[in-house]
Each structure stands twice: as C-alpha cells, then as structure tokens.
Image: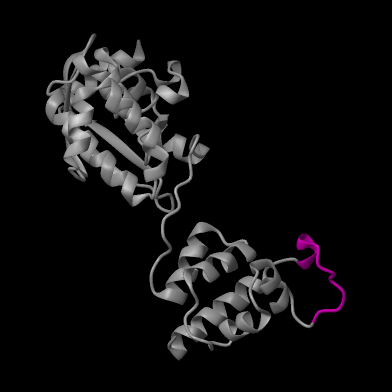
Amino acid sequence: MAATTGNRLGTYLRDRRSRLDPAAFGFVTGRRRTPGLRREEVALRAHISPTWYTWLEQGRGGAPSADVLDRIATALMLTEPEREHLFMLGLGRPPEVRYRPVDGVSPRLQRVLDALEVNPAIVKTATWDVVAWNRAAAMVFTDYAKLPSGQRNILRLMFAHPQARSRQEDWDSIARVVVGSFRADVARAGATAAITELVDELSRTSPEFDVLWRDHDVVAPGEGVKRLHHPDLGLLELEFSAFAIDGRPELGMIVYNPATDALAARIRAHIAK
C-alpha cells in the first residue's frame, strides 16, 4: 500500500474511531488520553489482530483485504457512504454491492414523488418491486395500494396480469425492454439470489417471459416513450426518465412526463375529480 494512501486510510480510521463512545459498546471508560475507542477495542470488535489494526492506522503492513475492511467498517459502525469511502482509501475501489430488501422509502423521498402533480412517478427496488408511488401513478398505471405487497412487482404485472398487458400499446417491445433492464438492475445490485423464486414462478406461468429470460439480453434504457391505453383517458403517450437514488443502489426512480400540454391538462382534470 503506497505511503500516501496508507496515511489517508490511517487518518480516516483514527477520525472514525475517535467519534465512538466506549460506554456504548460496553467498554470501561475510565481515564483515556484521547476520545473514542482504543485501537485494541476496534481490533476486538473487528476480530483482527491489534497489531495489524495499529499498522493500518500507521500506514504500514500492505493493503488490507476486503474482508478486513468490511469487518472494520462494522466495528466502527460506518454508514454505507462511509464504508464505500473506506474501501476507496484501502483498496482503490468501492465494495461489492450488498443487496438488501426494501419495504418503503423515506418521508422526504415520498414528498418528492407527491410534488409531481401530473407526472406519474414510482420508486422500484432492484428486483422491480414498486415500493413508492404518487397519486398520478396510481391513477394512470394501477392503484398499487390495493395490491398485496408481493404483487406490486412490475414483472408480475407485465406477465401475469392480462389487464395490465392489454393496456400496453406495444407489449412485445416493452416486455423485452423490461426483462433486459430487470436483468441489468439485478446484477448491478447483487440481487441475483433474491430473484430465484420470482424467475422460477414467471418461467412456469409465462412462456413469453421464459423465452425472454433465456435470451440473456441486457439493456439499460435511461429514457424512452411509453404508450398505454387508459380506460378513461384513452391512449396516453408518456416520456419517461430513470434516475438513480444517491446512496441507495437498490432503488431507482422512474418519472413519466406527459408528451403534450393537452395530455397534462387531461391528467390534471382526471386527478381532480
């Protein structure tokens, strides 16, 4: 490990260590020369040698392994952004992604969705479960609140719900893009193991999905146009853009914009009823 890199890592470790309260971890506080945990206490929590940890703080001993950095991150109670920074300092790369199931979003993010009056917007997980939506999305697509949580999955809606399928203007093209994008998101978020049951289910119940999944196509459409038939509003043309949510690789937001002012006015009037 280069001296400069090691010094930066050591400085970061000392800073994070100094911010922790020993009493919160069951350590005797007593008289301490400096605030925070001692080096040997961090080493104990990380299950590594105190000497090895001391060398890391001193910029000695070579580059740590990913496993050691992961254990140190846990010992220091680092947040995900802090953990990523630790890996960048120690190994020059971010850590491998760790997929975590998500049940919902923060109130702040929900307020962002709600502020989009005529723009249907959803937040989906890497496994394409819809975990947040606004009123426009409920009106234009489906009222997700009326669906059991396990059924709020875009793949299930596409391939297992005839009504959702019949509303798509070009279902074949949309289905191919959806499956290819789904595959890319799952791999990016490290969620391959989490989708086994869903893929098996859809492969059994939908021949179309089975064929598309076996094609192994990968696409990443950041934007495009969606056309669908709405029972009250007729044919809708919506331009969509996909956005990553900073610090949450397992989540993505899709915002749909009415292609014309006239369509926006129709959606606004329908929501106001």
Quadrant of image for the N terminus: bottom left
Which of the colour schemes (rainbow, by chain, secondary structure, one colour) is used? one colour
Where's residue 72, x and y in %? 59, 68
Relative to the observer, which residue lies in front, 77 or 204? Answer: 204
- Residue range in magenta is 22-32
The residue at 27%/46% (across/down) is 184
- In the image, is residue 90 above or below residue 251? below
Q: Nearer the viewer, residue 68 or 16?
A: 68
Question: Which quadrant would residue 175 be assigned to in this image?
Answer: top left
Q: Could you tell me residue 136's position as x and y percent?
A: 33, 23
- Seen from the viewer's position, the closer of residues 117 and 176 is 176
Residue at the (23%, 20%) spot, across then down: 265
Q: Is residue 258 visible?
A: no
- Give the residue displayed 48% in from the left and 45% down from the top: 100
Residue nearer the viewer, 24 or 19:
24
**Is 24 inside the magenta-drawn segment?**
yes
Decide: is 192 above or below 40: above
Q: Quadrant of residue 15?
A: bottom right
Across and down, in percent, residue 206 comes to 25, 22
Residue, x 38% and y 18% (percent of image)?
A: 143
Inspect the magenta stretch and tell me whether residue 176 lies in it. no
Q: Is residue 145 visible?
A: yes
